Amino acid sequence: MSIRTLAMAALAFAVSTVAAYAADPRYPNWPCAQAKVPEISLAAVWAGPALDDAETKWKDDSKVSALVSKLAARKTPLDEAEKSVKEFLAGSAADKTANAKLLFAGLFDTLNAQRSQVMSGLERVSHKQREAADKIREETIQLQALQDATPRDDAKVDAMSNQLIWETRIFEDRRKVVRFVCEVPTTIDQRLFALGRVIQQEME
């Protein structure tokens, strides 16, 4: 591949990749194909009794707090998390409803926070990608000018082309990471829904 062809390919790649972002004008830095839903609504994942003061009191219960941390961790397999929920509520006896509400309130709060953190990170990386695309675009134009210059400085052409190759590679690596991380909010949604369902079933 010639240097000119490489430059044009790099430019086309950067522009087309960034142009694919931001399908929703409300969120210009949102890089995922999935629509951005800023926060999980309580009604979408909980059909049990009103949480009331459980939304603020769950952190005061050390057992609930510890269990929430374990259940919310993505490294904890979902089937193991569901089993832990059942074991915890099975031993709650008369306090089962109160403990179930505390547990779900903690999961809802914690997983929503995790989700927001991941989404903010995605948007920060997306913003960097836009800046990187602009830089690649500018350097492609500079490289073309160097190629067309008379006399031509081959050392500068080589240095600029190598820099462009490196920056395009970084751009592509980030794009792959973003594509992977874009799945995380959905995974969190599914986890919260599944655990919420188990908690409600155990309350019945």
Image (cartoon, grey):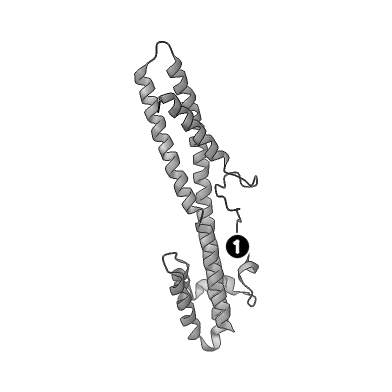
Where does residue 2 sit, x and y in percent of width and height? 40, 25
User: Image height check: is 99 above or below 156?
Assistant: below
Amino acid at the residue labelled 1? Ile
Q: Where, quadrant-wise, is the C terminus in this rendering?
A: bottom right
User: Image height check: is 33 above or below 93?
Assistant: above
Residue 136 in view here: no
Residue toward you, 96 or 78: 78
Residue toward you, 137 or 50: 137
Where does residue 85 sit, x and y in percent of width and height? 49, 77
Q: Name the secondary structure under disc 1.
A: loop
Where does residue 90 sit, x and y in percent of width and height? 49, 85
* Left or right of residue 34: residue 86: left
User: Image height check: is 93 above or below 33?
Assistant: below
Residue highlighted by disc 1: 40
User: Image height check: is 96 above or below 43?
Assistant: below
Q: Farthest residue toward the top? A: 151
Report how many numbered discs are placed on residues in the image: 1
Q: Farthest residue toward the bottom? A: 94
Identity of the residue drawn at 41% across and 39% down: 170
Identity of the residue drawn at 52% across and 63% down: 188
State which quadrant residue 100 falls in. Answer: bottom right
Identity of the residue drawn at 39% across and 34% down: 166
Q: Where, quadrant-wise, is the N terminus in this rendering?
A: top left
